[in-house]
Amino acid sequence: MNITFVTLFEELIKGYFEDSILKRARDKSLFTLNFLNPRDFSTNKHNKVDSTAYSGGAGMLMSPQPLFDTLDKLREDDVHIIFATPVAKQFNQKDAVRLASKKHIVFVSGRYEGIDERVIETYADEVFSIGDYILTGGELPSMVMSDAILRNVDGVLGNSESLEIESFDCELLEAPSFTKPEVYIESSVPKEYLKGNHAKIRELKLSLSKSKTKFFRPKELSRHLSRVKA
C-alpha cells in the first residue's frame, strides 16, 4: 500500500512512522510513505495557500489553486483521496478494514478554518470525522485513520490473531485483558482466565464484553442484542 499525506506540516507526521510496529512494517516495504506540500504548488509569489472567506468571519481558508494543482498531480495514479473534516461520517473499524485493500490512499489535511469546499467536491472519494470536536488541523485525524488502516494490511501486525479479538468488529467492546502477575496490589486476575477451559473463558469474556459495552456504549449493546434475537 502507498500512503500520501497532503499537508503543510510534514514534520508533524513523519515522526509517528519512525518507531515501533509501523517503522518495522515500512522497513519491510509493506507500505510506502510520501508527502506533498501545497505550498510547493502555489502560484502566489509568496507561496500563500490561504485567503479570507467570502462569507466573512474570523480566520482564513485554504484556497483552491494550490490544492487543485497538488491533487491533479496525484490523479495520474490509481488513488483514493480522503479528507479529514468534522462535518462528515465518523470513521470506524469497518472503514479501516475496507480501506486496507486500497493500493494508494491520499490523506488531505486542512489547516486554518478549513478548505474551500470546491476542493472537497472535486477530489474527495470519501470524507471522515474522527469525533465531534475541533482540532487545529487535519494531520492528527489523518494519522489516526492511517494507523487504523495500516494495522489491517497483511503482515503489518506480524500476528494476524491480534486482529481477531479487537473491539468494534461487532457491536460489543473488547473484554478486559490481563497479564502476569496473577495478583498485583491485592487485585487478582479472574480465575476463569487461569484454568485453561476455553469454553468458560469465552463465556466470561462475552459477559464482560457486554458489561463494558452496557456501561460505555449502551446503544451499541441494544443494537447487538436486537441483532442476536433477529
Image: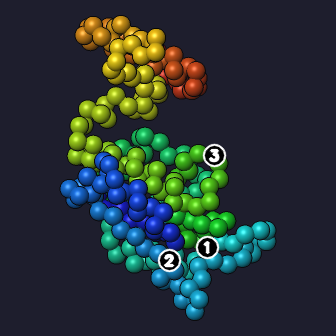
Q: Which residue is mark 3?
A: 132
Q: Looking at the image, is 173 positioned above or below residue 68?
A: above
Residue 85 place in picture, x, y as percent:
58, 57
Q: Residue furthest front?
A: 185
Q: Which residue is mark 1?
A: 62
Numbered circle sitting on residue 35: none
Q: Residues within 10 Å of mark 1 (few under 14, many from 20)?
A: many
Residue occupying the point 51% across, 80% down: 39
Numbered circle sitting on residue 38: 2
Numbered disc 2: secondary structure: helix
Q: Quadrant of the N terminus?
A: bottom left
Residue 225 place in picture, x, y as percent:
49, 18
> Which numbered disc flags the more N-terminal residue, 1 or 3?
1
Q: What's under tag 2, amino acid-wise?
A: Pro
Residue 133, visible in the rendered structure: yes
Q: Looking at the image, is 76 positioned above or below residue 45?
A: above
Q: Are marks 1 and 2 in contact (CB under 8 Å)?
A: yes
Q: Looking at the image, is 188 positioned above or below residue 79?
A: above
